[in-house]
Amino acid sequence: MARRAEVGLVYAAGLVQGLALVTFPAASSIFTNPDGFGFSASRYGMMFIPQVILAIAASSLGPGMARRWTLKRVLRAGISANFLAMILLALSGLLQHTPGVAYAILLAATGCLGFGFGTVVMALNTYAEEFSPGGEDRAVLSLNALLGAGTALAPLLVAVFTSLGAWWLLPLTVASALAGLLVLSARQPLPASAVRTSGGESSPRLPRRFWLFAAAVLLYGIAETLSGNWSGVYLTAERGVSAGGASFALTAFWAAVTLGRILFAGLSSKTTVRWIYVGLPVLLILAFQAVLRVRTEAGGIAAFSLAGLGCSAFFPLCISLSGQEFPRFAAATSGELVAFYQVGYGVAAFGVEPLRDLTGQPMGSIYRFGSLVAAVMLAVAFLVVARGPRAHG
């Protein structure tokens, strides 16, 4: 039985990981502002390539690393990579007037963040399920609610620190929290059962039905990133919203993600979980249609809040439902789902600008595409709940 200190550490790490993850997109207006780094939208999007590649590699290889090193060591390696990412991001602020050097440092920083995110999220979701037998849905939703709370805080803190003329204080603050986690995690045993970390095989082969969950998560990654990475650029460049107003809209998005996870954790049961799972893509379809019609700052906040609610519980439910359906492969499925999330993230993070350059469409067109993605998510979600074991309904 896990001690309270171990459980608390896992949930605290989720909160800090959320802060670290969104620190880069939250500073998008600084990266693209001529008075900041002055990067083009295309260059900003390409900045996330190392993050995606290393997150996919880390989350896919994470279960194997856990078998060799233990899950605790994998978690600590990921926290260390996140710490280095935040230090590099803060350092880049000293080099704004030498954009080539700053960009190289930022590429290294996003790569470290990708490795950190891939390993930490895989490990934390595995621990959440391990520490809550019989209550996996609620545990994973609660963990991801805290991760969402961190993502909601990041853009708000960027706005505060930017108003003080010191945006780089955010990565330094996050780095301090990560250093604290490293110290605390060294003192906790953080065990994980052999079943969850290895599935009893040296290289577990995942069941066919797992790939439905993988497809759902990939589509979710695209939908979430259209809001999480591009809302600021869309609202400021195409809708005339101020940078501060765009930051509030992004904060509203992540706050709604967090509140939705808390709400659905309370509502989740074996009876309701399938309706929640299928209903969320419907909310996303409506949200992206609302985003297309935004004309004001308040409208942007409202539309992206709805998008956040639509995103909220979908990813954590994919993890918990797949973990329940395939308990022998819990760490492997968690790692693979994080990898597929990062593939979707990558498609949206650095595929938007090349697509717009190719088609000549305005930024708003990506949210029409988002509605289509959400519709396919809905179809896949129906397949998951319709063909899943009765016990999960």
Image (cartoon, rainbow, N blue to C red):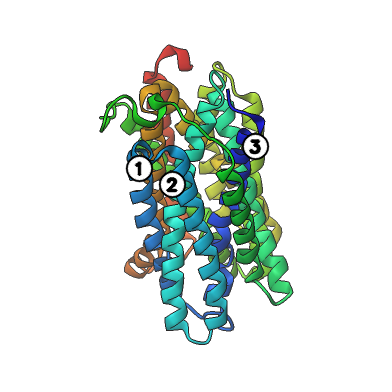
Q: Residue furthest top?
A: 390
| Residue type marked 2 | Thr
Q: Which residue is mark 2?
A: 119
| Residue found at x 31% / y 24% | 200
Q: Helix, strand, or loop for circle 3? A: helix
At which x and y percent is residue 130?
50, 27
Q: Residues within 10 Å of mark 2 (few under 14, many from 20)?
A: many
Count all numbered tags in the image, as a single digit.
3
Q: Is residue 128 visible?
A: yes
Q: Are marks 1 and 2 in contact (CB under 8 Å)?
A: yes
Relative to 246, does residue 120 appear above or below in the rendering? Answer: above
Q: Helix, strand, or loop for circle 2? A: helix
The numbered mark at residue 65 is 1
Sequence-earlier tag: 1 or 3: 3
Q: Are marks 1 and 3 in contact (CB under 8 Å)?
A: no
Which-is-in-front pick, marks 1 and 2? 1
Sequence-earlier tag: 1 or 2: 1
Location of residue 306 by image quarter: top right
| Residue type marked 3 | Gly
Q: Which residue is mark 3?
A: 8
| Residue found at x 37% / y 69% | 360
Q: Helix, strand, or loop for circle 1? A: helix
Q: Are marks 2 and 3 in contact (CB under 8 Å)?
A: no
At which x and y percent is residue 98?
48, 86
Sequence-earlier tag: 2 or 3: 3
Relative to 95, does residue 302 appear above or below in the rendering? Answer: above
At which x and y percent is residue 352?
40, 62
Distance between the Cα atoms at labels 1 and 2? 9 Å
- Left or right: 210 with respect to 72? left
Location of residue 385 by image quarter: top left
Q: Residue furthest front?
A: 187
